[in-house]
Image: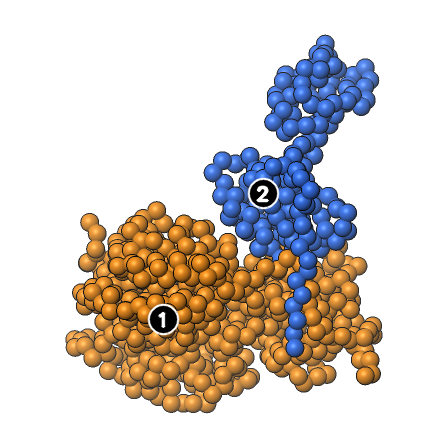
């Protein structure tokens, strides 16, 4: 499992270049999250590539080659944090959701509940979320939505937006 | 200084002129009309009207390949833009700097399925180095400047600028400012290599027993011919060029062992197979070179010099990679070899072995003088005759098929940028418009388009453009009355089942066709008449001549690598092959 962090110019078509690269080059992507950053000219992406045997170096190089990609880093190669949020809506049954949630090492909270459904959130490691979903599979899901993994390096350094390259002409 | 007020359309053309663009190729239409009006009112940039947008891109591409400067074209939205796609993909695959400007429907109409609206950013995305959708007219000069910078630096490639019509409105003026500096975030360029890598490279090169230099189109793009030649001389080892690299090392030099790969020479493919060191310069281990990558260069250490880091370790893992500009890096290596006082006679025995291979199964470059009972012309003889008539000095463009391979094999290219063909995409229809681009760049040079009767019909309409602008190109049509290369594969792999490769009864009379456009048409069917016709064709300096040469329809291109095999496994003729 590789988590890749990427800073992208906030330009028309920029995101489609990143996504297009994956289909164009035959790479599989397990999850992708995109959101604005504190710098309004940039978006930040985290991508998860789970496929075994994927040539991660080649993928990183191809991503970095895109003019709109400002910085890319494989978080899995450095000391980093990764987590995911899932919102789960279940049909009410004899099934004890509370009990299950107590037993699992995910931050969780029931957000809404009526006679016929429960909505709760879980936050934590992607693998553990997937284990939980496997258990819940026996129950009737109404809906599951997941954020995709988000990641950041530990320590004080950041995924630097290296300074603009100035190109001068005479 | 007085402020200069321009419309978006005027700013676009002015910015091109400020980028030193002298010529552009294009075709007008609704969304580009404001731009065309701006073109009309100035004389710094000449606009060439082609007959199909595909030809505009190929002409700009041919211009770029011959000059090393970026080619520029202009098309309208919708069908204009989609017609340009084949040419953009052609340039992308061969890393050719192009700036393609496409008109787009007005901003407020984008997304409404407006008349002639097409998502050019989306459609062109996988085949461009980068693209811009203009959002504010004032941004046009900066975008133009960025587009040229991106297209021409590092590994070159095509850049699209999509311009909504309302942003070129002649009534909306703003102050024109051409930027003197450019800011690009994270646009990494690599020039020189680390000294320690240079030392490693020199060590690998000089400690090898059987080295080979394998140079491709990237070496031409980097203008590294002089450096590659010097490296060859310092090493005294065999040098081979890819289809895209022909001319970067002079074909007439004794160390040159010809083109390698699918239809490479016996000696080049054998040298690659037996080498213990392969030095790739601006070449990307494409599948038409390596044959089966799992069986490629198993005895060899590999050094790879490329301007694009993603080309390295993509297909073949190498022992030493140097990301950089080939000209700079080779110059560094040459310095190091000179410092070491390396004695190039070390590789004499290996060089002799290559020459022995050539003696055994090399190409016959003297087929014009060979005794022949019949008067049937072989396609190889046409190339040899054209070489003779031009003294090897012509710019030669080509299309795709057997004729292309024969031209690559038999016309000796002694200089870079003189052999102009679509190697990566293999685009039939490229040859004639590319020749127009070359002719515009070098009006006083001889420009020949070596084509086939299949390919030439894919952009035949450009005979009209050639008439309009008086372009005396020489079209040498190797007419085998079939899609020869497809037919060859059907002969070799499909039991001679000729599926959809012939049109003999419906071929046009190319002579009359050429004449109807105001050109000269000539037909040759007999070997005994070939040289005279060729001489005459090239002697008509101010005429476009369409020389229609009937060639043996049963000839195959050899050598040919065995599918899935290694580089030593070749068919050498219809009856001889190197493998069981
Ligand atoms: C646009 C395009 N369509 C199809 C092909 C596939 N193709 C490769 S070579 C060839 C035959 C070319 O025929 P011709 O131009 O007569 O050349 P010959 O091989 O006969 O010399 C074809 C159809 C191609 N390369 N490009
Ligand atoms: Mg043909």
Judge from the rendering whether residue B400 lies leftward or rightward of residue B115; answer left or right. Answer: left
Query: Does A109 appear above or below B458?
Result: above
Query: Does B332 appear above or below B395?
Result: above
Q: Quadrant of residue B390?
A: bottom left
User: What crowding class fits label 2: few (fewer than 14 Cα within 10 Å), some (14-19), or many (20 or more)?
Assistant: many
Q: Quadrant of residue B392?
A: bottom left
Residue ID for mark 2 = A74
Q: In the displayed orientation, state which residue is furthest to the top.
A: A94
Can see residue B578? yes
Percent across and percent down for residue A131 are 61, 22
For mark 2, name the chain. Answer: A
Percent across and percent down for residue A152 are 67, 39
Q: Residue at x 32, y 57 (%)?
A: B277
Residue A146 - label? none
Q: Residue at x 57, y 72 (%)?
A: B70
Question: Which chain's colour is orange?
Answer: B
Residue ID for mark 1 = B338
Indicate if the residue with disc 1 has its beta carbon within 8 Å of ligand 1.
Answer: no
Indicate if the residue with disc 2 has its beta carbon within 8 Å of ligand 1.
Answer: no
Question: Which chain's colour is blue?
Answer: A
Query: Does A37 appear above or below B541?
Result: above
Q: Residue at x 81, y 19 (%)?
A: A113
For mark 1, name the chain. Answer: B
* Secondary structure of residue under mark 1: helix
């Amino acid at each position: 499992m590789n988590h890749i962090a990427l800073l992208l110019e906030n330009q028309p078509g920029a995101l489609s270049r990143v996504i297009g690269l994956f289909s164009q080059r035959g790479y599989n992507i397990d999850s992708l999250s995109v959101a604005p950053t504190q710098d309004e000219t940039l978006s930040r992406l985290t991508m998860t590539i789970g496929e075994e045997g994927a040539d991660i170096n080649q993928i990183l190089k191809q991503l970095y080659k895109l003019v709109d990609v400002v910085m890319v880093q494989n978080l899995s190669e450095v000391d980093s944090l990764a987590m995911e949020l899932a919102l789960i809506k279940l049909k009410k049954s004899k099934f004890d959701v509370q009990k299950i949630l107590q037993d699992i090492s995910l931050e969780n909270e029931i957000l809404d509940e009526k006679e016929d459904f429960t909505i709760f959130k879980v936050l934590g490691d992607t693998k553990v979320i997937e284990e939980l979903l496997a258990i819940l599979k026996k129950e009737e899901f109404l809906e599951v939505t997941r954020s995709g993994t988000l990641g950041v390096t530990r320590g004080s350094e950041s995924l630097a937006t290296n300074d603009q390259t100035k190109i001068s002409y005479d | 200084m007085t402020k200069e007020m321009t419309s978006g359309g005027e700013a676009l053309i002015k910015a091109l002129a400020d980028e030193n663009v002298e010529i552009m190729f294009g075709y007008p239409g609704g969304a580009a009309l404001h731009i065309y009006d701006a073109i009309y009112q100035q004389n710094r940039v000449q606009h060439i009207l082609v007959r199909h947008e595909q030809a505009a891109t190929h002409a700009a591409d041919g211009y770029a390949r011959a000059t090393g400067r970026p080619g520029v074209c202009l098309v309208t939205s919708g069908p204009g833009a989609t017609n340009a796609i084949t040419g953009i993909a052609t340039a992308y695959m061969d890393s050719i700097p192009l700036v393609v400007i496409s008109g787009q429907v007005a901003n407020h109409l984008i997304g409404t399925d407006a008349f002639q609206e097409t998502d050019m950013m989306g459609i062109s995305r996988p085949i461009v180095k980068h693209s811009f959708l203009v959002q504010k007219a004032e941004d046009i000069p900066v975008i133009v400047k960025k587009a040229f910078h991106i297209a021409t630096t590092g590994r070159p490639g095509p850049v699209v600028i999509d311009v909504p019509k309302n942003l070129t409105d002649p009534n909306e003026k703003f102050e024109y400012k051409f930027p003197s500096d450019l800011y690009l975030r994270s646009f990494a360029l690599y020039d020189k290599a680390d000294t320690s890598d240079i030392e490693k490279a020199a060590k690998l090169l000089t400690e090898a027993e059987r080295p080979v230099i394998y140079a491709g189109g990237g070496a031409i793009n980097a203008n590294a011919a002089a450096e590659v030649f010097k490296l060859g001389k310092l090493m005294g080892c065999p040098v081979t060029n890819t289809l895209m690299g022909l001319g970067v090392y002079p074909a007439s030099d004794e160390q040159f062992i010809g083109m390698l790969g699918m239809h490479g020479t016996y000696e080049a493919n054998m040298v690659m197979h037996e080498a213990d060191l392969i030095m790739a310069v601006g070449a990307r281990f494409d599948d038409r070179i390596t044959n089966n990558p799992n069986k490629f260069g198993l005895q060899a250490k590999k050094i790879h010099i490329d301007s694009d880091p993603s080309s390295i370790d993509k297909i073949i893992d190498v022992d030493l990679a140097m990301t950089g500009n080939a000209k700079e890096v080779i110059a560094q290596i040459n310095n190091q070899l000179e410092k070491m006082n390396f004695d190039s006679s070390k590789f004499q025995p290996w060089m002799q072995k290559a020459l022995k291979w050539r003696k055994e199964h090399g190409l016959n470059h003297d087929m014009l003088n060979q005794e022949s009972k019949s008067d049937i012309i072989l396609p190889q003889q046409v190339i040899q005759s054209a070489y003779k008539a031009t003294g090897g000095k012509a710019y030669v463009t080509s299309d795709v098929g057997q004729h292309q391979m024969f031209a690559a094999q038999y016309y000796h290219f002694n200089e870079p940028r003189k052999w102009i063909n679509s190697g990566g995409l293999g685009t039939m229809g490229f040859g004639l418009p590319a020749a127009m681009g070359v002719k515009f760049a070098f009006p006083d040079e001889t420009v020949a388009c070596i084509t086939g009767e299949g390919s030439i019909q894919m952009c035949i309409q450009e005979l009209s453009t050639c008439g309009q602008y008086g372009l005396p190109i020489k079209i040498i049509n190797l007419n085998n009355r079939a899609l020869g290369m497809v037919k060859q594969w059907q002969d070799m792999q499909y039991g001679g089942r000729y599926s959809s490769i012939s049109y003999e009864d419906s071929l046009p009379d190319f002579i009359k066709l050429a004449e109807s456009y105001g050109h000269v048409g000539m037909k040759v069917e007999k070997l005994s008449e070939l040289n005279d016709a060729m001489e005459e064709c090239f002697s008509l300096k101010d005429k476009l001549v369409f020389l229609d040469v009937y060639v043996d329809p049963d000839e195959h291109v050899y050598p040919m690598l065995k599918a899935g095999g290694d580089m030593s496994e070749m068919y050498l003729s219809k009856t001889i092959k190197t493998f069981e």
